[in-house]
Image (spheres, coloured by chain):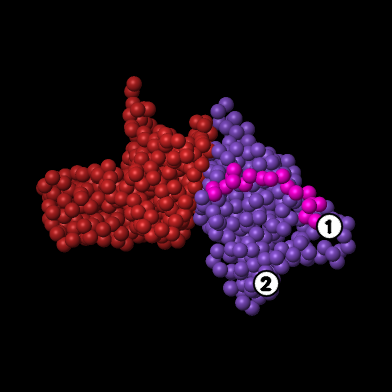
Amino acid sequence: MAVAKQKLSVPFDYDKYLRKDKLPHIWCPGCGHGIVLKSLLRAIDNKELSKNDLCMVSGIGCSSRTPGYVDFNTLHTIHGRAFSFATGLKLAKPSLKMIIATGDGDAMAIGGNHFIHTCRRNIDMLIIVYSNAIYGMTGGQFSPTTPIGSIATTSRYGNVEPPFDICEMAKAAGATFVARGTAYHTQELERTFTEALGHKGTAVVEVIDSCPIYFGRMNKQRGASEMMENIEKNGTVSVKQVDKLPAEKTEGKLVRGILHRVEKPEYCEQYDKLIVAKATK
Amino acid sequence: MAAKKKLMQGNEACAEGALYAGCKFYAGYPITPSTEVAEIMSVELPKRGGKFIQMEDEIASMAATIGGSLAGLKSLTATSGPGFSLKQEALGYACLTEVPCVVINVMRGGPSTGYPTGPSQSDIMQAKWGTHGDHPAIALTPAYVQEILDETVRAFNLSEKYRTPVVVLYDEIVGHMREPITIPEPGDLEVIDRAKPDCDPEDYKPYDDKHLIAPLAPFGEGYRFHVTGLNHKEDGFPTNDSEMIDINNRRIMQKIDDNIDDICKNDESNLEDAEIGIFAVGSTSRSAKFSVNAARKKSIKAGLLRPLTIWPFPDKAVGELAEKCKVIIVPELNLGQMVNEVKRVAAGRCEVVGIHRVDGEPIKPAQITELIEKYS
């Protein structure tokens, strides 16, 4: 059988990290958020991080419900401000290992200012943007990453606004690790998260995800599997291949993989090194 | 040891009080007329193992302040009218999630950008009703530089004790006034730290309704719990159970209502035989005190009730005043906020009249004296 030939993953104990009594989760059938969480938990395990040190902070939206399901120190805050709550926590207690769960609306619209300044400070945290180009929790309104022309409940005639490129935004704002993954390429996403968790500074990982219930239904992508196929075949191209492929094969596609990685002083370390050292001299 | 006397500005005294109370975290955004608080904290906190951060806006400042507190540090932010408006959603989050923190609002003229360098008392109602939903509110109203120090310490104490944000409201005049004050020595003033759990982490419930106020574990110390702004159960996780929602929503109010006598604090002068009562806070109460003294010299029986806690409202003290006076005069630097509360409590037992000013000038003793003499 074909399946038998595939390299199967080592059995993995997800229960170790989940609050099992809080399941089932609220995500709709076909939503990719659970897949993203799975890759994250495997990456956390790869890095052997302590649950007592892990702190997951989120804002509002479907993706922001992630903290409720993981057995860490967890904070579900208000719309768009997860970065700021997390900045306070991290500065007050630098031993915390911060992970932000946010969405394209939470991070790019209402939280845009905080996103930019968090990247600029290069404070040590992993920001995961579950990017499905729609406001799912409120029933399918267009977001700052909705493609032009797409239908949403507030863009019935087609969206007229150009979308943000989250990764370009993160890089421009000063994030020192920027990557893009998808809910389809799960092993690649696990590797990306593992790298991101090992990075010192602000790491942004945009995960291209799908919302079949709202985005798909309104945009003639009728099923979850169809949307996943679309991510695989039409949506993205690996950063390793992008330069080798002819232009017509990469045009309009988002590039997957680690897009930007530089070493720069991290905020909390700089605080101790520059401010505390001078203040206590 | 001789008491340490110092000439100090109101905002400096605020920072001094915060440090005395053990504040170790400050997140803020520059805004007139409160900025001195941030400036001093930025210098002093790093010397004392604390953290200061200037955030990108007022909303982020409030959020980071709550974050600092959840990490276990006593946390402060300071602002003024427009910034106080921006902080309101996160302030409500702190009320529901029961995260202690202190918010200083040095009141300036409004609405909108208003008169940034002028005094006002127009955020009295915002301090009570600024954020959406029913929620507990504690707000303190110091009127002297010494009091700003003392009341900032008390604000931290109440916040830590009741696991709720506490607002300190003082007008720009008091914030920028300089007066000689006594810096308390360690031990002179009570300093309260939040209760921490001593149970097994497995058994920890951050909103355990066995307690009116449950102990709060800092993040990162083995108590892995969940905090959400959704209505939640005693374990901190969201719930749609109407009974649980009701219990929690009522409990966060009850913890204040049941402790009004501990939270309320008033300064009374010449009230024993008063027939004309004045109810005033902040700089206005200083004018009122002058007028009361002047009236007494003319044998007019005037007295002053000066609340240091404006929220919860001092119903008991105002009720007693309404019983004995023929009139309560309420001078305030707004167009009528406290006066309606006084009318509510007086409930027709005496006349209640306001003196209101929104031109950026203080209410002067002559204005109050004129009314006292009219009723004498």
Q: Position of residue B273 (x, y in %)?
A: 11, 47
Chain red in the figure, letter: B
Say if labels 1 and 2 share a chain.
yes
Q: Where is residue B64 in the image (x, y as percent from the top left)?
A: 52, 46
Q: Colour of chain A?
A: purple
What residue do we see at 26% from left, 58% from top? B341
**Chain letter of disc 2?**
A
Residue type beneath disc 2: Arg
At label 1, the amino acid type is Val
Mark 1 and 2 residues: CB-CB less than 8 Å, in contact?
no
Q: Mark 2 points at which residue?
A: A222
In front: B355, or B105? B105
Residue A17 in magenta stretch: yes
Residue bounds of the magenta highlight: A1-20
**Quadrant of the rendered structure where residue A194 is?**
top right
Observer able to see residue B40: no
